[in-house]
Amino acid sequence: MKVYEALARAFAAEGTRRVFGMMGDGNMHWMQALDDVGVDLVEVRHEGAGLGMADGWARASHTPGVATATCGPGVTQLGTALVTAARAESPLVAFVGESPTADEEYNQRYDQARFAEACETAFVRVLSPETAEDAVRKAFYIARTEFRPVMLSAAMDLQQKAMPEGEEPYVPSTSLITTDPMAPNQAALLRAVEIIAASRKPVIVAGRGAVWADAREAVLRLGERLGALLATSLMAKTWLAGEPYHAGISGFYGTRAAIELFEEADCVIGVGASLNRYTTEQGYIFPNARYVQLDTKPHLLMGGGRVADCYVQGDARLAVEALTQLLGDRGAASPGYRTPEVQAKLANQFADPTPFTIEPGALDPRDVCRALDEVLPATIDLVSGSGASAGFAVMLMNRPRSLYLAGHFFGCIGQMLPAAMGAVSCTGRPAVLLDGDASILMHLAEIETAVRQRLPLLIVVLNDQALGSEYHKMVSTHMRAELATITTPNIGAVAVAFGGRGCLARTVDEVRSAAQEWLASPGPMVIDARISRAVPTIPYRRLHYGKDE
Amino acid sequence: MIALEEGFDVPATPRTVWAVLSDPRQVVPCVPGAQLGDQQADGSFDTTVGVKFGPTRVTFRTRVALELEDATMHGRMTAQGRDALGGARVQASATFDVEEVPGQPGAHVAITGQVDISGRLASLIESGASAVVRRMSAEFATALAERCAAGTARQQ
């Protein structure tokens, strides 16, 4: 057996079902060997997009996604996607080729280890046939325990060497790792109880850690006991939607009603949420609160280098259940926020009634989101992008959904089309992606991949024919905003040319009927929704115009 | 840096207006969200000002010093402080003049100055801060005019 075959079998033994990437002579033998053992190969049109798909897979399943690229130029294409995955704490393994060990003048030669380091990515090199399987195990071990991307690099000539005879079966990294949820420390819990029991207006902010720990019921029970307001970080956006006293997102995307209620909070309980500068608005969103933070990390700095008044390391569900128990033992119960007045204040919190003048032939982006949220049932997963378009999708798509993925991790555009494709590929469930035109056009070629893969993905382009964030910022600072505008073709027609479905929408009815058509038979489809640039998002109205909305 | 450039007429005599502007107990309540605190030995005084940047309220604690030229009705205000969470510093300075309006009974107030906000808060407020400051100075002008008019009414 050759090294590349052993490497492929080891990937399969690690649970790899699907690999996203582009073939080159640094990885083609390995890819053929993967195909031989029944692993799906998804050929993409840009290596970085393939890595983004593996990232989406990882975010949807919280298990390692796998991507691949050839050596040198294949590796450098991974840059932005690797940093994004690293910031998203996505477990993934990228198998990359490496130029022949003895050829210093090989034209694709490149210092891949230093590149990985600069991309905040762990690096493991296959050094010999004897240690090839160890390298795969180590790469997956790091991905699974440190929740970060790992680049596994194997020189082309080394891949062709023979494996030693009579090897034992491959032992996957999963057999090295215990996955028992971590019990919280009792003394830390008691300190947390002191703070919580003394509070009258507690807010629970749940993040992805709570989602991953399946802590929903536990969080709801704690909320009831404390009369807490329920909020989430952006990352857990729809997780508590529909529950009484759900205040939506804490942070930049918070509603006015929620932010006014947060001002009264005297205690914030972060559950599997980093409580970073965006979630706490640098702390200003909770000016009067003490913080209790529950997370699996050894310790956490919140936004601005501050720490919680009490940090409890542990599994989110176990920690919340233990807190509820201890608070119950003390007989602590208060109405907290749970009054008819608060309920009334939150009743229409997501409405955005501010009128703007929309030019003929253009859509109000808010109407597009409202129509989609109404037409697409809760069984449809949701992915939003970054930039201006995200402000509409995040603030107006409020139906509870079983999976929601947000952009924002590296503040870059273009990453969420691949992520949505990877997530849909993983779950097999239909999903809708709302993203901007510049974002979708950046990886436009991957719509062809979506068509080839027959992914049940509806791509709604909130197309303002501009770099929307820059456009709105330039308008507000009296710069020449027209410099941020770029015309686009009919992106729906491009999807049709790729073999998918697509259309241009200039009215809400066109959006609605296209979404209904997709829902009847979910497949790869693009709705190019031509939105007006006249409407800034609510966060932009605050940020650029100081509006109290 | 946010520039302040405010000019407005007040239906009261220049001396009435000057009396309000030069008295911390009267002028501080004209600043929206402001409350007067303790007076210091050097004549400066403490204030707290709650400012809404969007729906998020930030409370600044500042020490304000006034230099007054009573004869010419010219004053200079400097203020510095930080917000209650310590994430931002604020520095403000302004000069103000009260003048007669030629041929009319009222007074004209001219204010020129600047406000600097630095630190963690800056990323949260961006260009919206200047809109907030503009709104506050307009509200200040209105409140000042009302207070002077009320004072004039009481005198009559």
Image (cartoon, coloured by chain):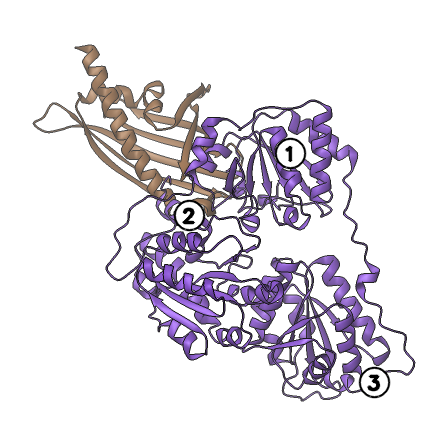
Chain colours: A purple, B brown
Locate residue A508: give its quadrant. Answer: bottom left
Question: Percent from the top left, x then y, of residue A422?
Answer: 59, 66
Do the residues under discs 3 and 1 have CB atoms within 8 angstroms?
no
Res. A222 mark: 1
Q: Are marks 3 and 1 on the same chain?
A: yes
The residue where tag 3 is placed is A1
The residue where tag 2 is placed is A539
Q: Are marks 2 and 3 on the same chain?
A: yes
**Residue drawn at the location 29% of the way across and 31% of the way down:** B139
Question: Percent from the top left, x then y, of residue B32?
Answer: 35, 28
Which element type, helix, strand or loop, lies under badge 2? helix
**Residue drawn at the location 23% of the way across and 60% of the way down:** A360
Spatial separation of the CA atoms under disc 3 and disc 1: 56 Å
Of callouts 2 and 3, the N-terminal one: 3
Of callouts 3 and 1, the N-terminal one: 3
Q: Disc 3 residue type?
A: Met
Question: Percent from the top left, x then y, of residue A402?
Answer: 57, 53
Callout in the foreground (3, 1): 1
Counting the numbered discs, the total is 3
Q: Disc 2 residue type?
A: Pro
Q: Nearer the viewer, residue B134 or A501?
A: A501
Res. A337 mark: none
Task: Pinpoint the chain carrying mark 1.
Answer: A
Crowding near the residue tagged with mark 1, few <14, some 14–19, many ≥20 C-alpha atoms within 10 Å: many
Left or right: residue A549 versus residue A16 is left
Q: Disc 1 residue type?
A: Leu
Task: Pinpoint the chain carrying mark 2.
Answer: A
Left or right: residue B150 versus residue A228 is left
